[in-house]
Image: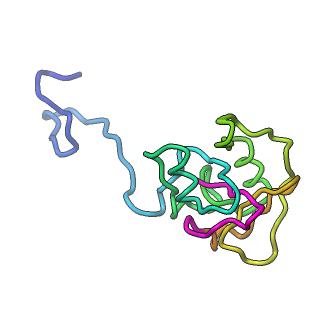
Amino acid sequence: FNSGTTYSTCSAVADSGWRRFCPCSVVGPLVQLASKWILGPQGVSCYSACASYNSSFTCVPDAVAGSTYGWPLTSSDMQNIIYKTYDISTNTLISSTMCSPSLDTTIYPQDPEYYGTSCSYGSGTQATCVALGDISWRRFCP
């Protein structure tokens, strides 16, 4: 209820006896989440892939590993990413059966990637937006 006073700012004080409902979030890299995942072209970085998909998009370098939209840590994380990834070459969701998640035991900053029937992911902690995908592989980008 607004009794005529404007409460559209976070610094506004509620009337005596009233409490405010306020939208709150923590500021900083730990809460940066991607709004969607895309499957970029072969051999490019996630920064380039995101910009080619939409000029107002950028890769989220600090996407929280293991979170809903963060770099994958487990097979389950990777499968969840596959379910919500757009292929920028067709602008459609990719098929959830196009590949099987496989853990890449060697640390690569370009993971997660797709090639053939493999969706390769690493530990999530080494993933970067600047790493170029392998020449024949396509990167999953937050």
Which residue is at the far bottom? 106
Write the residue at 62% across / 47% down: 37
Indicate left or right for 105 with 125 as reference.
right
Indicate left or right for 40 with 32 as reference.
right
Q: Give the image location of residue 2, x and y in percent.
A: 19, 23
The answer to whether residue 8 is above or below residue 76 is above
Q: Give the image location of residue 123, x and y in percent.
A: 71, 70
Write the residue at 79% across / 62% down: 120
Q: Please, what is the dominant secondary structure of the magenta stretch?
A: loop
The answer to whether residue 116 is above or below residue 29 is above
Q: Give the image location of residue 106, x and y in percent.
A: 78, 78
Magenta extent: 128-142
The answer to whether residue 57 is above or below residue 101 is above
Q: Give the image location of residue 99, x and y in percent.
A: 85, 50
Viewer-proximal residue among 102 and 28: 102
Indicate left or right for 53 with 2 as reference.
right
Q: Magenta segment: does it hold 133?
A: yes
